[in-house]
Amino acid sequence: MTGLLENISEIIDQITIFMQDGGIICGIFLILLESIIPVLPLGVFIAMNINAYGFILGFVISWLTTCFGCFLSYTLFRFIGTKLLKLLSKKDLKRIKKGTKRIRNLEFSNLVLLIALPFTPAFLINIIAGLSNVPRKKFMAAILLGKLFIVYFWGFIGKSFIESMSDVRILISIVVILVIAYIFSKIVAKKFDLE
């Protein structure tokens, strides 16, 4: 186990050095890449930014870039969404319309909450918000606020994990926090019918 932790620590150190040598462009690139390919781990990239550039700069890079990526996705689907909807089956179209109606009618605070939850599918919210013509100002304000919490959450979890790989108690507490956040996110997603 000790050898595995040392290997992980060495890999993290090498990635940190690479990112520091590449400058903040590396951090921006990672977060933008996650915006384009949503299966990539945003939490890991945020933790890497914070580890490489310090908490404040890493946080700001991650927050602004993830907001920018969300806004790009929203804008793209706002303009080409109707063309894409024509390609869907009637069943999928019915689900999308149901989702767009729910997102469009959400109060601002509920939209922020939905965006701020760690396991809510952000790419899906961006797409549905774009398709449902949620007003730009409302969407941007919700993204800027909601992403503050998500970037802080993943930054805290990631940084804690990196710093505490040898302390089993902290690792267990991280797992408990993630499980609670996951369950809460699933409950809220089910309430808004985003499953």
Image: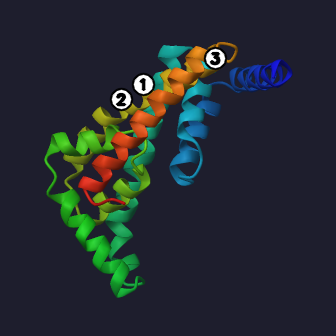
Residue 178 placement (x, y as % from top left): 47, 33
58 to the left or right of 89? right
Q: Nearer the viewer, residue 164 or 33?
A: 164
Of the image marks 1 and 3, the number of the one nearer the N terminus: 1
Q: CA distance from mark 1 to mark 3?
A: 22 Å
**Percent x, y for residue 85?**
36, 78
- Near mark 3 (Cα within 10 A), the count class, few <14, some 14-19 or many ≥20, is few
Quickly name the residue at label 2: 149
The amino acid type found where label 1 is placed reads: Tyr
Disc 2 + disc 1, Cβ < 8 Å: yes
Asked whether residue 53 is in view, the answer is: no
Q: Position of residue 163 (x, y in %)?
A: 63, 14
Q: Mark 2, residues whose alpha carbon is within 10 Å: few (<14), some, or many (≥20)?
A: some
Question: Callout 3: helix, strand or loop?
Answer: helix
Q: Picture quarter containing residue 166?
A: top right
Relative to 4, is 85 above or below? below
Please identify the quarter of the rendering in which residue 170 is found. top right
The residue that label 3 is drawn on is: 168
Q: Which residue is mark 1?
A: 152
Q: Are marks 3 and 2 in contact (CB under 8 Å)?
A: no
